[in-house]
Image: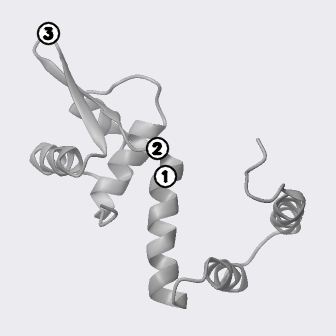
Amino acid sequence: MTDLREAELETMRILWETEEPLKPADIQQGFSWEIDNGTLRSTLAGLMEKGHVTRGKKGKAFFYRPKSSREKLMSQIAGRLANFFTGGSAADFITQLIQSEKLSPEEIAELRRIAEMKINEPKGGKRK
């Protein structure tokens, strides 16, 4: 379910950034690289098959919208990466990411803020 190719991830990014369903031509324009129409249509078909997008028809045109949320998909992908790189430890995976990146003081402060929120989070539930 989380085995997504780069074009599929880029398509999902574009769809998540808008509130409205998009036609393939609109999605194609949002790509950060050039993608031909046939490749995009194949990408959309793959995403539909995997259950990540839905398609509706308005007039003669098909419009696409995300079915999977960004958060859910990111969590699934991060879990797979954690399994691969650290044997499944989310903490070890996050630690390795932080250690390998050059972070600004502002980014470090934000990470500290998030860590403090997690420490103070009630057991068994997420704070909203």
Q: Residues within 10 Å of mark 2 (few under 14, many from 20)?
A: few
Q: Residue at x 52, y 61 (%)?
A: 75
Residue under pointer 2: 69
In the picture, residue 6 is in which quadrant? bottom left
Quarter that holds the C terminus: top right
Left or right of 111: which side holds 24?
A: left
Q: What residue is shown with label 1? A: 72
**In the image, residue 100 lies at what x, y percent?**
66, 85
Counting residues from the N terminus, which is met first, the one under dot 3 or under dot 1?
A: 3
Whether residue 33 is visible, yes or no, is no
- 63 relative position to 97: left or right: left
Query: Which three-letter amino acid code belongs to the residue tagged 2?
Result: Ser
Residue at the spot x=49%, y=48% of the render? 70
As drawn, the residue found furthest toward the front would be 124
Residue 56 location (% of width, % of height):
21, 23
| Relative vertical location of residue 85 with respect to residue 102 in this rendering, above or below | below
Question: Which residue has dot 3 on it?
Answer: 59
Q: CA distance from mark 2 to mark 1?
A: 5 Å
Residue extending farthest to the top is 59
